[in-house]
Amino acid sequence: MNETPHTLGSARTLWDLVDRRAGLTPGRPVLLQAGRRLTFGELRTRAERVAAGLYGMGVRPGTVVAWQLPTRIETALLSFALARLGAVQSPVIPFYRDREVGFALRESKAEFFAVPGVWRGHDHTEMARRLGAKGVFEAYDTLPDGDPSVLPPPPAEGTSVRWIYWTSGTTSDPKGVLHTDRSLIAGGSCLAHALRLTPDDVGSMAFPYAHIAGPDYTVMLLLYGFPAVMFEHFALPDALAEYRRHGVTVAGGSTAFYSLFLAEQRRRPGEKVIPSLRLLAGGGAPKPPGLYHDVTREMGVRLTHGYGMTEVPMITMGDPEDTAENLATTEGRPPAGMEIRVVDGEIRLRGEAVCRGYLDPAQTAAAFDAAGFLRTGDLGHVTESGHLVLTGRLKDVIIRKGENISAKEIEDLLAAHPAVADSAVVGLPDAERGELVCAVVEQPPGAPGLTLPEIVSFLRAEGLSVHKLPERLEVVDALPRNDTLRKVLKYRLRERFSAPSS
């Protein structure tokens, strides 16, 4: 076989892509983790055996299978086994708890639910049973196994909805985003081509595999035939040994990762923290231009930042060969096939990588315009050179470490606190997280003073996920409001409590 990444990108389904890559380079590694090594050939062979095991459990083409699993080789095997069967997958971020998980299970009508058992002190199996999940099974160290001869043929087309991803919008409940194999292949292909990667590169996955970036990144590995190191628990400096041992050349994930690597570099002046590293890349959160310049100057690597979302995993990406000015101040350019239209300042998108819509038909109808462009709710403009510049958001979402957080969800919970008359939750610029969560509270007369630990404890008790908890509390005499509908003017809060620009 003599196929290039471009012809591999024409694969109809994700399983086509696995099969073709396994035929080209069966002995080359694809995933590396904690002393373990999985080759492309083993990925195909083992995923088929897992698929047969799932088939024996009753999983069929079109069966909805939810999974809430950490970033592990077993998770990737389970996911590709489901792709081999043509099942509908509903990945759930591992740190989600009862509120989000229960919603995802109900809305997706999942018939099976794979969990890791007790993971990082939380009993996912007990939670699943408490939520009344169907077909609960643990898939951490062991996976279903069977004889592949029992399997039906793999799916013949990649345009059917086979993925339900979850994202929080301006409302308290997450939205189920519908993807196809082809939309995920398109996103991963665009990312791979934009970063100018080669078979000699070594990547890294330090983010949740259940994130839309999971298949996006894995498609890139399959197209170019290079491996990635997986991190179940990512923390610096502990993770540095694995980056060095495997000679990682490409790392990143989001703004938070850039800041973490930079902080580690500053602890070791004169010594390159990852000698093999040549590129940091990511997206999912705002990137301050100053951070770009600090990283490239102090770490001696290139940094390319892009723009994506659960609905469209890759929209634009910085080119490593671009100018420093464009890399620092823009989100890069769109790939061929991604149409960007700016209407009244709002960015709208059309192309193969765009999702098919949402589980809720009303949300789908509201999200697409008459010409079939997805309304992102993000504000920006395209420069004469074709680079995209983001200037703000229409939708009231905080993006912390690449994850969307609904301000309304937190505000709704705070409304039940006896010492809170009203509240507004806003995202404030933060070099490490992209944005941090700030709760601005108006108290009723005579109420005792509030502290951040008290608010955090209250929200924890209400079931709010840890990654959504406020990191800052401001108590004001009165929230700023307009003169007509008395709507809280959040932009004034952001202006008041944001750190001065450097």
Image (spheres, rainbow, N blue to C red):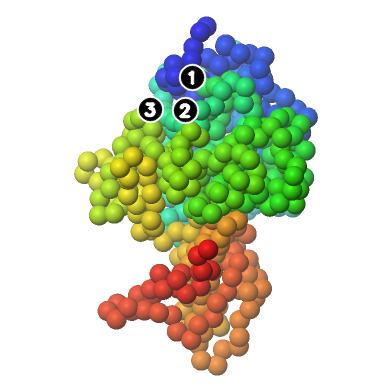
Classify 10 Å Cα crowding around label 1: few (below 14), some (14-19), many (20 and above): some
Q: In this view, does 273 lie above or below 11?
A: below
Residue 206, how many percent across, how many down?
64, 41
Residue bearing mark 1: 5
Cα–Cα span, label 2 and label 1? 9 Å
Residue 109, how many percent across, how many down?
47, 43
Cα–Cα span, label 3 and label 2? 22 Å
Q: Residue at x 21, y 44 (%)?
A: 370
Q: Which of 208 and 293 is in front in this view?
A: 293
Q: In this view, does 217 lie above or below 115?
A: above
Q: Is mark 2 on a helix, strand or loop?
A: helix
Q: Which of 393 and 163 is in front in this view?
A: 393
Q: Which residue is drawn at 55% across and 16% down?
A: 21
Q: Residue at x 25, y 46 (%)?
A: 369
- Residue 159's mark? 3
Q: Nearer the viewer, residue 20 or 458?
A: 20
* Amino acid under disc 1: Pro
Residue bearing mark 2: 193
Earlier sequence position, callout 3 versus callout 2 = 3
Q: Residue at x 65, y 47 (%)?
A: 298
Earlier sequence position, callout 3 versus callout 1 = 1
Q: Nearer the viewer's eye, disc 2 or disc 1?
A: 2
Which residue is farthest left?
370
Q: Can residue 56 be seen in this view?
A: no
Q: Nearer the viewer's eye, disc 3 or disc 1?
A: 1
Q: Which of 190 and 389 is in front in this view?
A: 389
Classify 10 Å Cα crowding around label 2: few (below 14), some (14-19), many (20 and above): some
